Image (cartoon, coloured by chain):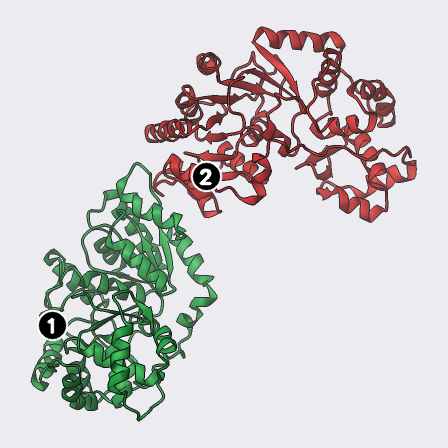
Chain colours: A red, B green
Amino acid sequence: MDSGRVTLTPAQRIAWLRLVRTDNIGPVTFRQLLNRFGSAEAAIEALPGLSRKAGRPMNVISQSRAEDEIAGAARFGARLVAQGEAEYPQHLNHISGAPPLVTIASGADLDWQKCVGVVGARNASSAGVKLTRLLAGDLGAGGYTIVSGLARGIDSAAHRAGLATGTIAVLAGGFDRIYPEENIPLAHDILDSGGALLTEMPLGWEPRAKDFPRRNRLVSGLSLGVVVVEAAKRSGSLITARLALEQDRDVFAVPGSPLDPRAEGGNLLIQQGAKLVTNAQDIMDSLESADPARRALFDPEWRPDTTMAADATEPSQTEREAVLNALSTTPVEVDELIAQLGLSPHAMQILLLELDLAGAIEWSSGQLVALRHR
Amino acid sequence: MDSGRVTLTPAQRIAWLRLVRTDNIGPVTFRQLLNRFGSAEAAIEALPGLSRKAGRPMNVISQSRAEDEIAGAARFGARLVAQGEAEYPQHLNHISGAPPLVTIASGADLDWQKCVGVVGARNASSAGVKLTRLLAGDLGAGGYTIVSGLARGIDSAAHRAGLATGTIAVLAGGFDRIYPEENIPLAHDILDSGGALLTEMPLGWEPRAKDFPRRNRLVSGLSLGVVVVEAAKRSGSLITARLALEQDRDVFAVPGSPLDPRAEGGNLLIQQGAKLVTNAQDIMDSLESADPARRALFDPEWRPDTTMAADATEPSQTEREAVLNALSTTPVEVDELIAQLGLSPHAMQILLLELDLAGAIEWSSGQLVALRHR
């Protein structure tokens, strides 16, 4: 992946899509394959050999299925955008596990840099909906694009308040699988208003439970900060807040009475360090005096460094076994493994790539690796 | 004032009371007089000379009026307790402008060390009253004495919840001037339950507006921390919170919906750094992991250092005029004045004492001095 701005050729885009849609190839593995083989096309050619070595068949989707997905997206007015292309949302470059490809419909005139996530309970109270309307409306008037997850309750109220000024809905499934169905009209309103729908999932993908937290990392990843309006103690909104913190985004929470169970999540976040906000000005003041750690988010010239020094040496079978022995179901840092085993970073990278393709390991936060529970 | 524990003789107590009740003698001046003349009796004898020098008559109350006040207090089951005596609330020693004498009724078996202030709006909502009952009830069950100001609303709810386990009401006026009158039965309930009433004001004193913030410094001063339950943006509860901060006490606030005006004060306090609390456990956890700055509050052996080196030199008229010239209505630190004018700390002390007795200056936070507005 080039760290400057590129435009994929149609053939490259199809190859990227085929590789991205292959089982066991997540964002981290995708990047490793591209770094190792130089292009998606070359990685696809090398996969059969790699998967034999990993002891597990890798089924790359066919050229025609990839072409069908691109054509299907076009019917929704959507296009597949690759990391590195001009239209790829800049802020996503800063998150670990950034999706190599996202499908985006509409949103050409949106300000993708000045985004705030507004999330909260599906079973929102009428006070919560009113507050969301006030907050998101004023944030929109202040020039901020409203990002949310198109769920019932707070998410829907946030999108509606953002229709006039710009809003982005991040889906947990495919464009043809809007969830909940009752929000299909809202999704159309978003598109009609010049707002955007975005997903990393393929057409036809029915969202499963685990796709929602995965989606939430994109809600926070697109945003400078996330506001939690009403949230129970164990809720998706708190997951979004945690992801936002991991991504060095600001987390804001609206307080509420201790007698109101829908305030528990927000109050808890404030106790844990989130900023208490009661109006949009609080949020804008805070974002505009941004933490130095987040300055890169405001730098349009910033590019992720995803290159890696080439190295022709293949790891040996002994090294392969040493890595497998060293791993457990407790996540460890790759640097720690490298130090312990005395392997070169490049050899470690190749071995972990093979294990990843074999479905034997899993990544957390992009840097920690563990054996997958069987 | 001795820094160990003493018991005043009846004659000493009368002399202290006469000096404390003299116009223009506040806690700071009282301490300066005692330091300069060695005893309240000697200070009373010296006052006519001092007040001539200050160009203003000083009217010390008569021996019989002081005796009447002590007898009057006794009819309410109350006694006048001097700073330094065993019964004087230890925590008050740590505040600036600690009252030399307080009148206390009942409360002999209370835990005066483990106190929490619970304050809030007079026009409390029913949710606020319920929350106060829960918080104060659980704090009481956890061994904390509930301190408040006997006002309507949150204060009353806090005292009532503390009746079973111990509560202290700090009055802004005299024992015979309970305000509001509707709380006279509650005051009796507090006494009957073994709780305490405390005031620094004389019998017969009708509380004026400015006596309430003055009283609030004792609510916070008696406490390890103060909880604000419901408070408007400009309210006495926020004054108590500010005083608590100045006194290095913890400040806790209960959050509420931004749509509820009675939550504005609490939310604002949290934005400014107060700890968000939703239940008594939050408060107790925080108090029990107390900040090192407040450790002295937990040390029963701690005594204030109020002694001063004796020095026989009288300040000259030139020095007197230099100090008066240097002062303005903007408060300055005494140390700053001393450095600027090149006076000895002792001479400065005497000159400020004279100006104080003349009603020409006023103190803030015990260390800042300014010309009084005329």
How far across and how far down the image is residue B32, in percent? 27, 82
Please indicate, yes or no, whether residue B254 appears anywhere in the rendered image.
no
**Which residue corresponds to the image point at 84% horizontal and 18% vertical from the top-left?**
A45
Q: Which quarter of the picture shows residue A60?
A: top right
- Look at mark 1 in the image and give the residue it sits on: B203
Secondary structure of residue under mark 2: strand
How far across and how far down the image is residue A340, in percent? 82, 48
Q: What whole-number distance in Å separates the C-alpha atoms at marks 2 and 1?
A: 51 Å
Q: Which of B69 and A260 is in front in this view?
A: B69
**Which residue corresponds to the image point at 13% horizontal and 69% vertical from the top-left?**
B174
Query: In the displayed structure, does residue A288 sit left or right of residue B338?
Result: right
How far across and how far down the image is residue B236, in percent? 24, 55
Residue furthest front as drawn: B318
How far across and how far down the image is residue B221, in percent? 31, 67
**Which residue corresponds to the image point at 34% horizontal and 81% vertical from the top-left?**
B306
- Look at mark 2 in the image and give the residue it sits on: A252
Secondary structure of residue under mark 1: loop
Q: Which quarter of the picture shows residue A14?
A: top right
Q: What residue type is labelled 2?
A: Phe
Q: Which amino acid does label 1 sit on?
A: Leu
State the quadrant of the N terminus of chain A.
Answer: top right
> Are tags 2 and 1 found on a single chain?
no
State the quadrant of the C terminus of chain A.
Answer: top right
Query: In the displayed structure, does residue A142 sit left or right of residue A20?
Result: left
Q: Is residue B69 above or below residue A77?
A: below
Please indicate, yes or no, whether residue B86 appears anywhere in the rendered image.
yes
Name the subunit of mark 2: A
